[in-house]
Image (spheres, helix red, strand yellow):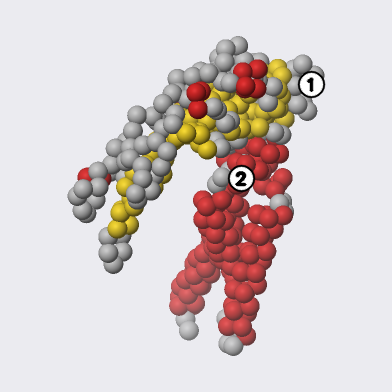
Amino acid sequence: MTDEQSSGTKPGILRQSAGKGMRLIFRILGGIALLLIGFYVLVWAEVDTAIQGAVNLNAGVADDEVLVTFTGRLSFDLAAVDDSLLSPSGQESSQPYAVIQRHVQTCAFMEEAGQEIRYSKRWVSDMDVPDSTRFKQSGYDNIRGVLSSGVTVGKGLTLKDDEDISYRIRTELGQLRILTMGDITPKKADVRGARHVDQQWVYIDRHCSPDKGDIGGQRVRFSVLREGDRITAFGVKQGESIVAHQDDVYLSKGSRDMLIALVRSTNDTNRWMFWCGGGLAIWLGLYITISTALFFVTWIPLLGGLIKGAATAITFCIALALTAGFVFWGWGMDTWLHWFGGLVQ
């Protein structure tokens, strides 16, 4: 080999080595990025993360525009009034309502698809009455009814704790998300158009069965928050008020921990998708990082294949353990909340 050939070969080898080195570095960085993305997705899945990271105003202080929770006894300046609920009677008259939520169900035809199309009468939410013009057979016309579900809220809702610290709930009606309320059992005379009362349900039409009840007949029940109820609110602190965070102020009867548990339980379906996606990203990130680091031994025949297989199995087990530990036992929760909590919120 001549000197010219030797000098021309060395730069080529160096360029190839540098290229391989850069590819290895990018693979490792990509694996680490996937690993972090996986944990970020897991944190995002914890829809109660914002509440867990919020300042507890019962135990400390917070600046304005900070996420907070506050627990106290509920009071108001002007009670809520529902046009359907004519007048509280009995014991209820001494406990005016801060919030009244009206749940309405309508007797409607439901189309059941199968080998043979069938129609049945059922109580369904007034918001879920099927459009009978889309039914495959005619003669089963639904009527939506007069009543509709809704919420009425009193004026000047305020929470005050045992230390006489108080915060006003300042938000628009559509921004108030109430997770738990108490049902009432009004008397027949208390509800406009009532024909029958069965526990919490007040029937405007008593039946909804194949041989009884009119399509469009309705029943209604009322859930309320009362003056003096112990309520936890979650939102953004503005002076002496709590306002909406991402268009919602959360209210729940009971403690801060109960509010967190309720928010978590109402979003379990979506969380499974986030858990699976986050776990998969963690596994891929670990596999890419570790398999790249093992590059210098995986070229060995037979031994390299065994090492690759072992890396796949080991990283999968590690990813599964990390995901399960984070989700069910809170491993590293504080660390990841510190890193990602602000982004999630």
Residue occupying image coordinates x 70% and y 48%: 333
Residue 152 higher or lower than 279, as above or below:
above
Left or right: where does residue 138 sit relative to residue 265? left
Q: What is the spatial separation of the Cα atoms under label 2 and label 1, in whole angstroms?
A: 28 Å
Q: What amino acid type is highlighted by mark number 2?
A: Arg
The x and y percentages for residue 69 are 67, 29
Q: Quadrant of residue 183?
A: top right
Q: Which label sits on residue 162?
A: 1
Residue occupying image coordinates x 56% and y 20%: 88
Left or right: where does residue 150 sit relative to residue 97? left
Front-most of residues 169 and 220: 220
**Looking at the figure, which quarter contains the C terminus?**
top right
Residue 41 higher or lower than 88, as above or below:
below
Front-most of residues 38 and 190: 190
Q: Quadrant of residue 341?
A: top right
Q: Which residue is mark 2?
A: 264
Left or right: where does residue 22 sit relative to residue 126? right
Q: Earlier in the sequence, mark 2 or mark 1?
A: 1
The x and y percentages for residue 141 are 25, 43
Crowding at label 2, few (<14), some or many (≥20) Cα neighbours within 10 Å? some
Badge 1 marks a residue whose secondary structure is: loop
Outermost residue to the top = 77
Residue occupying image coordinates x 44% and y 29%: 194
The x and y percentages for residue 239 are 64, 15
Regarding residue 71, the answer to whether it shows in the image is yes
Q: What amino acid type is highlighted by mark number 1?
A: Asp
